[in-house]
Image (cartoon, grey):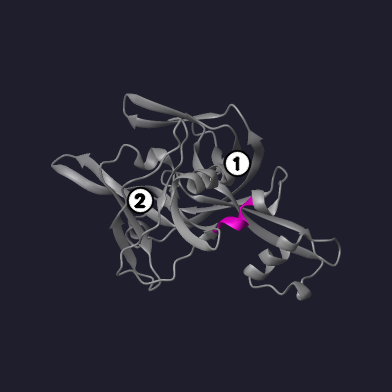
Amino acid sequence: VGFLLGEVQKAGGADLEPLGTFFVLQIQRDADTFAAMVTSRHVVADQSLVIARLQDGSGAPIEWNVSGWIYPADGRSDWAVRPFQPPPSAQGPFTAVPDWQAHEVVNVKPKAGTTVYFPGLLTGVPSLVANATPIVRSGSVAAWEQSGVTWTTRITPSEVKRWTADRVHLVDVRSWGGFSGSPCFLQFQTPGPRRQKWPDLWFELARSAGNDPEDLGEIHTFTVWFGMFAAHIEESGIGVVVPSGLILDLIRSEVT
């Protein structure tokens, strides 16, 4: 998880200010893999300059220009993607979310109240912004796969942009400015493989988290990626999450 910064006009000139969050997905295409950046469209669409800030493998923040974002064609969808291309001087490895760990692939449909986590940018703490250090906030599933949901972002004091999607997830969260573009994760518990039959992919999930399936107990906890935090609905405490499947569709069709 990293931060996006842009030029904000102030008295005497423009300052580089934090705009929102981005994260990296690892995409499998045939025998090859590539990485893509993801954020909210409203974070980057009206910015003439966007800078990514991310901790590299050394733990130090790196910065580079990230232009050429790709958006859904309809103009109403609040997500954006582009290739992940850090500067040559950056030290790896970088953490990315594998596409096969999306909840649509894992085939998990959570109940209301399932725990949600999302790491991102807390704009009010300058040291966190400067060091590209995200914080993690939590909440719970409020409603799943809802249609007809709209949300707004303010472009200027007098201009508001309205967004929507074919389907979204709603989460009950505490948040603040800067988390637009954050990855959202579900954490749920399930009976272990000794108590019920598991799909093969669940064993791979357990191994990817450093667990030996032979040693799992009666109850096991999984964490899977299920989308991107886009916005609050009019500061109601209900957040909008763009489903992971919609984001993966755009990457697979448009990012090379």
Say if residue 81 shows up in the picture: yes
Say if residue 175 shows up in the picture: no
**Amino acid of disc 2:** Leu
- In the displayed structure, 178 sits above or below 166; it is below
**Element carrying mark 2:** strand
Q: Say whether residue 170 is magenta.
A: no
Circles 2 and 1 in contact, beta carbons < 8 Å: no
Q: Which mark is residue 114?
A: none
> Residue 186 appears at what percent x and percent y?
63, 52
**Amino acid of disc 1:** Asp
Q: From the image, which quarter does the N terminus lie in?
A: bottom left
Residue closer to the observer: 126 or 48:
48
> Residue 96 appears at what percent x and percent y?
50, 61
- Name the side, left or right, on which 235 lies relative to 186: left
> Residue 192 appears at what percent x and percent y?
80, 64
For the point 20% across and 40% down, the residue is 10
**Element carrying mark 1:** strand
For the point 54% across and 47% down, the residue is 248
> Residue 215 appears at what percent x and percent y?
77, 75
For the point 60% across and 41% down, the residue is 172
What is the CA distance from the residue labelled 2 to the residue labelled 1? 25 Å
Q: Which mark is residue 4?
A: 2
Residue closer to the observer: 138 or 53:
53
Q: Say whether residue 102 is magenta.
A: yes
- Name the side, left or right, on which 4 lies relative to 29: left
Magenta-colored span: 98-103
Q: Which mark is residue 172?
A: 1
Residue closer to the observer: 135 or 200:
200
For the point 47% across and 34% down, the residue is 77
**Magenta segment, principal secondary structure?**
helix
